[in-house]
């Protein structure tokens, strides 16, 4: 870890903040006005030369100011993340609404983050490791149409409309509800094996087709990791930053957001790595997504309850406002933990 004295640290911070705001190389005269150091331009130039020798800033063109390097950003981010927890009232108010459907909540949350940060955002649907089924309710909608409501732990709900080949009696519907709940309640998806399925079908009195559709709905409610859903928003925010909008850069990033395969791999890797839990910042070449090598990617893990986890990612230029992004994500994680993991009243 590179150690900086207070003067160099403040100058590096000022260079990064100014570059975040303007996207232009930063000169010593600008820094002399930007900081509270009350130093001359000559003294600041000497300090900037030291920072350049340390590999923290670079001069892109002769007679130009300096811009941060990936190493400079890394030092800035690591220091920033040691003490960063602020209140974001808009995020808290949004979460307190507790949208009924998780899918709708995650989509709206991606949109909210994109608006608040002015960057591209991505959120994975949760992975349900070991989550148990709570109950199933089959209800008649029409003579040959049923509504199956599947509820798992953490109030994960899946509603499915099923068309029947023939009408089922009220007694038969009641018996099927009892059969499904007696055999499936309290089981995880892994525990609903072939033996369980065969037993239910044998006891379903000619309604094996309904059982198959219900089990498909259960599997979708307790979704496996190979079916990770990704919700995105704000991809066009990339065009706001000239260093990403030129050439093929923007189109490649937009393609990644449209196809989502690379995003799925990125967020899955984040979830799979024990040491990468919490908030992580990937600068330039540190990201695994080839089209984002000129970007910074900030990821975070959210947890709705034990075993129900997902990932959030924010993509922007290397000069992104790390302080705002990290603060927003930390507050979001805190509020989700308070709201979704606290015991129900």
Image (cartoon, rainbow, N blue to C red):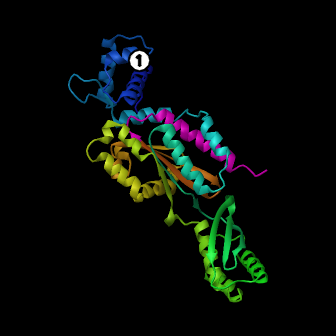
Relative image position of residue 123 (x, y in whole percent): 51, 51
**Mark 1 — residue?**
34
Q: Residue furthest left?
A: 62
| 333 inside magenta stretch | yes
Q: Which residue is drawn at the image coordinates 31% and 20% (left, top)?
A: 27
Vertical comparison of 97 with 69: above or below: below
Residues packed near mark 1 inside 10 Å, few (<14), some (14 to 19) or many (20 plus):
some
Q: Nearer the viewer, residue 93 or 62?
A: 93
| Kind of element beneath mark 1 | helix
Main SS category, magenta section:
helix
Residue 283 visible? The answer is no
Vertical comparison of 134 with 41: above or below: below
Please report the bounds of the magenta region as a residue range: 316-345
Tell me if 282 is positioned left or right of 278 in this view. left
| 186 inside magenta stretch | no
Vertical comparison of 144 with 251: above or below: below
Q: Quadrant of residue 25?
A: top left
Relative image position of residue 255 (x, y in whole percent): 35, 54
Q: Which quadrant is home to the N terminus?
A: top left
Tell me if 113 is positioned left or right of 97 in this view. left
Q: Nearer the viewer, residue 241 or 133?
A: 241
Q: Nearer the viewer, residue 66 or 89?
A: 89
Residue 263 visible? The answer is yes
């Amino acid at each position: 870890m590179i150690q900086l004295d207070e003067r160099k640290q403040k100058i590096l911070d000022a260079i990064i903040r100014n570059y975040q705001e303007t996207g232009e190389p930063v000169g010593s005269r600008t820094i002399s006005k930007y900081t509270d150091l009350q130093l001359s331009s000559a003294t600041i130039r000497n300090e900037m030369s030291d920072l350049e020798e340390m590999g923290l800033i670079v001069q892109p063109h002769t007679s130009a100011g300096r811009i941060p390097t990936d190493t400079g950003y890394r030092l800035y981010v690591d220091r920033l993340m040691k003490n960063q927890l602020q209140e974001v009232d808009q995020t808290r108010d949004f979460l307190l609404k507790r949208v009924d459907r998780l899918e709708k909540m995650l989509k709206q949350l991606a949109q909210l983050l994109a608006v608040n940060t002015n960057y591209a955002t991505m959120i994975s649907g949760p992975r349900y490791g070991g989550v148990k089924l709570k109950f199933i309710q089959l209800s008649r909608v029409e003579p040959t149409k049923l509504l199956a409501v599947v509820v798992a732990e953490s109030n994960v709900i899946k509603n499915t409309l099923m068309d029947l080949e023939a009408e089922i009696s009220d007694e038969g519907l009641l018996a099927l509800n009892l059969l499904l709940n007696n055999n499936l309640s309290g089981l995880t998806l892994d525990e609903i094996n072939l033996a369980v399925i065969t037993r239910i079908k044998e006891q379903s009195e000619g309604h094996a087709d309904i059982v198959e559709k219900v089990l498909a709905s259960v599997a979708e409610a307790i979704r496996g990791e190979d079916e990770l859903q990704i919700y995105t928003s704000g991809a066009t925010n990339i065009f706001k930053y000239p260093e990403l909008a030129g050439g093929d850069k923007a189109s490649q990033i937009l393609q990644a957001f449209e196809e989502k395969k690379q995003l799925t791999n990125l967020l899955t890797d984040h979830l799979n790595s024990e040491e990468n839990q919490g908030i992580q910042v990937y600068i330039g070449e540190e990201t695994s997504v080839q089209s984002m090598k000129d970007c910074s990617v900030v990821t975070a893990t959210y947890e709705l309850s034990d075993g129900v986890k997902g990932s959030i990612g924010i993509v922007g230029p290397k000069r992104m406002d790390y302080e705002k992004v990290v603060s927003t994500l930390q507050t979001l994680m805190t509020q989700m933990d308070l709201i979704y993991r606290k015991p129900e009243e």
